[in-house]
Image (cartoon, rainbow, N blue to C red):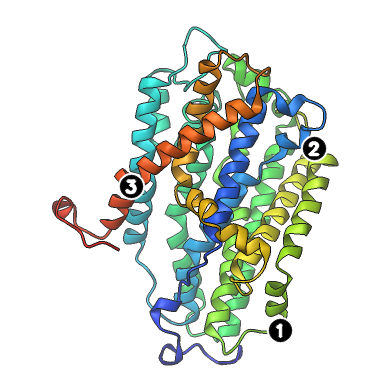
Amino acid sequence: MSASQPAQADTAPPTATLRPHYPSLEGLRTIGVMALFFQHTGYTTGLQARAGFGWMGHLELGPTMFFVLSSFLLYQPFVSANLLDRTPQRWGRFVRTRLLRVVPAYWITLALLILFFRADPDNPSSGGLKIDGWQDGLAIFGFAQTYNPDWFFHGITSAYTLNVEFVFYLLLPLYAYAVARFTSGCTLGQKVKFEFYALGAVVVASAVYRLAIELLFEDERRQCVAQAATGDAHLACAAVQWFPGYADYFALGMGVAVIASWRLARDGEPGWLRRIGALGSWWWAAALGLFVIYSGVLGTRGLAYVSPMKAEARHFMNAAIVVCLLLPGVFGAQGRGGVRWFLQWKPIAYVGLVSYGVYLWHQGWTDNAMEYTDSRPLHANFLLITGIAVALSVVCAVVSWYALEKPINRRRDVPLKHWFRPVAKK
């Protein structure tokens, strides 16, 4: 099928190929969650402040990796349905599936952390989960802690990314429906062009949103860290971390999904796309080079204020790094090259499989590892603390996967009244 011909359902690939399996993506999840882990333990132990280790404070690619992977995987079935004139997944089923995937594990982990790993409310430097009254607790359980700057670092601190993902889950089917309606009756090439025009508009709108907050509230943002410590933070301190500020990262993953789906909908793979896949390890070399620039030239110290222009440069550089890491996992022969071998190596892929649990437990076990070893904040043994925290987080993640997440995932299409009946293994 050429790009100028209408997409015809009768010539489309079978449904099973609309969302191909990408064996390297679990390994990319491992990279994402370990980047997040090492950044946090690097800060807690003080390693980031030591000579030669400042780069550990610039592993923000962790959340970015999850945003891009999530949007790529979740949007591809929608865009494939649009390009091939198939019926898309219903909004209700999609949201139900995502809620079942995310909410139960989060709520149960959060409850256990509050019960056993809660910070001392009378000790500001106490490790553990911070929570301030029932309103704070309600916001934390309701994926809304990000919307109050005084609560931003409460609960599972990194759960601000879940707050962002939660909004994305609600909006994605509506966005896909709108794009499909606008492109109804168009040729394949016209549909692809519109997809990229729409995603380009999302990128621009996201950048405008961030710049508006950064420029209009520059004075307030200079004091964000100090204000948060005293419970008097300005709303702008949190607003840059809301969904609109990261919408372009989701658009990036969706853009890769458009290319991957377009490849399925046409006859043969174009030469330029084959060359992208053939580069393999060179993409990771490029990612390393970009990270050196990111952490060296554009680096910051801790949570210090960053000027609007530098913040934007860092934001887009971070996106470029993640794209370079992602491309070998989507395009090219997945059985070739050292990068793909590493990503598909069973220990790496397995950690990626249970990475959601690692993400949820890593803060609690890091704080407890500090307490178990009687370590002082910012003056601890990084290898010891990280080793204990990673090991215990992975154990809890494995238990969470097999006892909770996987059984619920197998029942995502089962009516609630039949949930406790045996379900065929998948």
Tell me if residue 33 comes above or below residue 74 in the rendering: above
Q: Which residue is mark 1?
A: 271
Residue nearer the viewer, 270 or 147 = 270
Q: Mark 2, residues whose alpha carbon is within 10 Å: few (<14), some, or many (≥20)?
A: some
Q: How many numbered callouts?
A: 3
Q: Secondary structure at mark 1?
A: helix
Q: Which residue is mark 3?
A: 402
Name the amino acid, label 1.
Gly
Residue at x 68%, y 41% (from the top left corner): 59
For the residues carrying marks 3 and 1, which lies nearer the camera in this image? Answer: 3
Tell me if residue 411 comes above or below residue 376 in the rendering: below
Residue at x 52%, y 22% (from the top left corner): 369
Quarter of the picture containing the C terminus is: bottom left
Of mark 3 and mark 1, the one earlier in the sequence is 1
Q: Which residue is mark 2?
A: 299
**Farthest residue toward the top?**
122
Position of residue 414 measured from the top left corner of the image (x, y, whole percent): 21, 58
Q: Mark 1, residues whose alpha carbon is within 10 Å: few (<14), some, or many (≥20)?
A: few
Of mark 3 and mark 2, the one earlier in the sequence is 2
Name the amino acid, label 3.
Tyr
Quarter of the picture containing the N terminus is: bottom right
Name the amino acid, label 2.
Gly
User: In 3D space, how far apart are the residues under numbered discs 2 and 1 (Cα atoms)?
Assistant: 37 Å
